[in-house]
Image: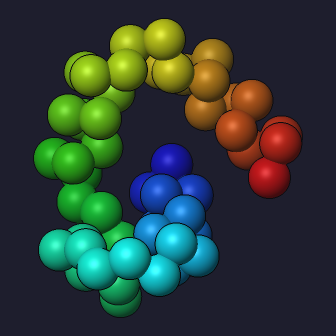
Amino acid sequence: MRIFAQAIVKRSGRPTRMNHVHGPSKKWCRKFFARNPQLKKEGQIVLIQAG
């Protein structure tokens, strides 16, 4: 998930506070899934297969 989010940010070219070397933090990932519960675990598998 973290690598996927990092790739999206790099492609967008928009300014961000995310660390481009290490990607989003674990805290960011937890909060993202809290905001988007439909993407938990099952969604991760779909995103990996789609990539």
Q: In the figure, residue 23 lies in which quadrant?
A: bottom left
Q: Residue at x 80, y 52 (%)?
A: 51
Residue 44: x percent and y percent? Answer: 61, 32
30 or 9: nearer the viewer: 9
35 vs 1, left or right, is: left
Residue 32: x percent and y percent? Answer: 29, 35
19 or 42: nearer the viewer: 19
Picture mark count: 0
Q: In the figure, residue 19 lies in which quadrant?
A: bottom left
9 vs 23, left or right, is: right
Give the vertical position of 44 relative to 39 (above or below): below
50 vs 3, left or right, is: right
Furthest-top residue in view? Answer: 38
Residue 16: x percent and y percent? Answer: 25, 74
Q: Is residue 47 visible?
A: yes
* Colour logic: rainbow
Q: Is residue 3 visible?
A: no
Q: Residue at x 70, y 30 (%)?
A: 45
